[in-house]
Image (cartoon, coloured by chain):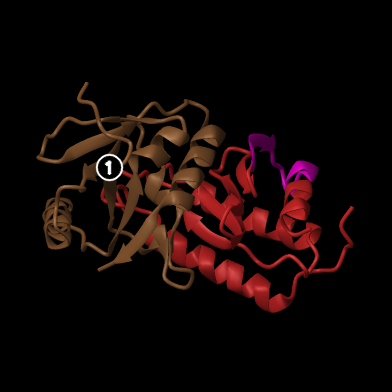
Chain colours: A brown, B red
Amino acid sequence: MVQVDPSEYLTTFIFSKNQFSLLNGRVKKYAFIPPKHRRLSVFRISELADHEVWEIGEKVGILRELPLLARADITVLSVNNAGLYIDADDNPPHHANIVGWHEKDSEIKLKATELAESAQLYVK
Amino acid sequence: MLPNTPIAEAQLDEMRDSLSEVYKECSRIDWDGYGASAVTEGAYEEALKLIDAIIDALPSSIPAPEIGAEPTGDIDFEWYRGKGQVFAISVGGKHRITYAGIFAGSKVHGTEYFEGTLPMTIVRHLGRLYS
């Protein structure tokens, strides 16, 4: 597994208005609840310029046929503090997954809440 | 035990409207672009029951929650008081409330059976959030 420095920044792209609050300027936990296969898709962005990050998001949006609305940035340290870790597959380039999720729904909910509390929202 | 003063009618309508909007947006597969499950009619109906249970159990001093959908297809009710102070419950049509919360460093999570009455565990955690 590729080693990822705790100080690195990650982002998850948001395609549903359900996943953030413009009123409070915050990311909601739904953006960090993993799908059934328990691998939460993120991109490693520390070495990218801001416009490059948005370009990746736009490409993901085209693939998913949904408009890119926002993104949520978070550090690897915050992920580790929630008891999770990063599996950097670089497929596509800069891609990684947040893994290590517990099977219990309530614990997943709690960890997603912790990640959302640590995340910074950027609206497109 | 929290005093039994009902949440205002306006809040009730607001919650039901929010729920309808969430159901409309999230009742198809992959609504989030990451393979989310659709919110089912069963989840929607149970969420309506939960709104009634919240109205019955909580005083007007506790604000109405924000309603959203989880990628699992569950309907979520979240009370956000500020950074590090959040509590949420969710239902998916399976007679079960899943909950999780952070209270200035302390964390809670678990599940409770739901058949129409808000469990005391949930009422206690909300009392803690707004104490």
**What percent of the width, then of the height, locates residue A36?**
36, 33
**Most extreme residue toward the bottom, as rendered?**
B10
Total numbered labels placed on residues in the image: 1
On the picture, is B111 further left or further right than A40?
right
Dot 1: few (<14), some (14–19), or many (≥20) neighbours within 10 Å? Answer: some
Can residue A39 be seen in the rendering of this structure?
A: no
Q: Quadrant of residue A95?
A: top left
Q: Which residues are magenta?
A: B106-122
On the picture, is B125 further left or further right than A79?
right
Q: Quadrant of residue A90?
A: top left
Residue shown at 56% from the left, 58% from the top: B83
Front residue of B49 and A70:
A70
Q: Quadrant of residue B121?
A: top right
Query: What kind of element bears circle 1?
Result: loop
**Most extreme residue toward the top, as rendered?**
A1
Front residue of B25 and A50:
A50
The quadrant of the picture occupied by the C terminus of chain B is: bottom right
- Name the kind of residue labelled 1 in the image: Glu
**What percent of the width, then of the height, locates residue A4?**
25, 32
Residue B110 in magenta stretch:
yes
- Establish if A34 lies above or below B19: above
**What percent of the width, then of the height, locates residue B85?**
62, 54
On the picture, is B93 further left or further right than A54?
right
Can residue B82 be seen in the rendering of this structure?
A: yes
Residue bearing the label numbered 1: A8
Residue B47 in magenta stretch:
no
Front residue of B122 and B38:
B122
